[in-house]
Image (cartoon, helix red, strand yellow):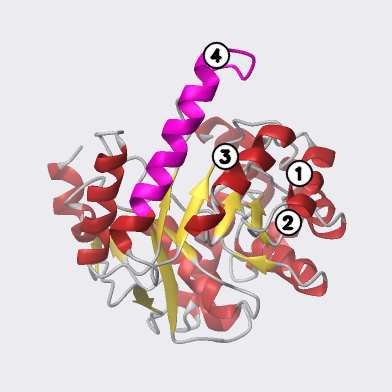
Amino acid sequence: MLHHIRTHVLPRVQGADPRDPDALGRRLANLAASRAGATAVSAVEQALWDITGQAYSQPIWRLLGGKARPRVWVYANINRSTWDRSPQGFAENAKRAVAQGFRAIKLAAFDDMPRLDTAEAFATAELGIQRVMAVREAVGPDIPVLLDLHCHFNSAWAIRVARRLEPASLFWYEDPVPRDDWEGLARVRAEIEQPVAAGEAFYGLEPFWRLCTTGSVDVVMPDVKHCGGLGLLKRIATLAEAAHVQVAPHNPSGPVAMAHSVHACAALPNFTILEYAFGEADWRPELVEPAERFVDGYVEVSDAPGLGMRLNEATLAAHQ
């Protein structure tokens, strides 16, 4: 990414007024033809929004059109902090997240799926189902449970597993099939009871337009780090709104990407819920000033200029 920034992105913006992030972001759009390019553009574009907010003493959410909500609902993604991958291990980590105030939980219960044409696949799928049901039992009926399948199934398997999981009352069923299987994704959504979410790896407008206009999803998940930046994320949300699709940004990320995502979510009328990487580093809240803080499953939207935070250099140095 640094190579893309130094050799492609910076020459396009050097000498320009940084206080016009949306226009500069559009100028950079043709550099985002690959994921690495889109990530580089996203990084620079986000920095421009922060600069602009500080220059005009305004929070980023105001520059994006205004605050639709004073706080943002978040879910705890427990997947990477669940070292014990047994059903009980997932259940215990889910309970820890709830005890810390989170009011929605996501897991990826099928990350160890082998090839589907093996006998082991059936046993592993059964284990994944047990993991989901253990989390549901652990958190009770009132905590939303979200499931990420990380594209491990074909449409037939995804439908079969979804029907087995109907008693879990999942909030959504995320990335059930490979990302290039557009027909399979639409088939899954047509056949199952659970809402379908997808889009975390896409960048630019076109794939999100396709998701929204082909009846493939109920929720799109653009990632501010990769999709093209804050301005593009807002445009994705606008086309999703026209298709009656909700937006839940992908965000298994650190506190800087979290803060940018919060500003975007504050301004989106069709926002639903934001991801938080739970339990991966106990020093994470202190990496920024002011420290990250969650209350009853929500994060307050900052009214401070720009991003509203800065890196804590002492914490950064301590955890190089």
Label 3 vs label 4, nearer the camera: 4
Where, by quadrant of the figure, is residue 102 drawn?
Answer: bottom left
Q: State the residue position of label 2.
A: 217
Q: State the residue position of label 4.
A: 119
Residue drawn where x is 66% and y is 68% of the image: 246
3D distance between C-alphas at marks 3 and 2: 33 Å
Q: State the residue position of label 1.
A: 185
Q: Which numbered disc, 2 or 1, marks the residue that appears first in the sequence?
A: 1
3D distance between C-alphas at marks 2 and 4: 31 Å
The answer, for residue 77, to whether it is visible in the render is no
- Amino acid type of the residue that numbered disc 4 sits on in the rendered structure: Ala
3D distance between C-alphas at marks 4 and 1: 25 Å
Q: Please tell me how crowded label 2 is: few (under 14), some (14-19), or many (20+) other residues with Cα within 10 Å.
A: many
- Is 132 magenta? The answer is yes
Is there CB contact under 8 Å for labels 2 and 1?
Answer: yes
| Residue 218 position within the rendered picture, expressed as x and y whole percent measured from the top left | 70, 62
Question: Is label 4 in a helix, a strand or a loop?
Answer: helix
Which stretch is magenta?
A: 113-135
Is there CB contact under 8 Å for labels 3 and 1?
Answer: no
Label 4 vs label 1, nearer the camera: 4
The residue nearer to you, when weighing 45 against 158, is 158
Q: Which numbered disc, 3 or 4, marks the residue that appears first in the sequence?
A: 3
Question: Is label 3 in a helix, a strand or a loop?
Answer: helix
Q: State the residue position of label 3.
A: 5
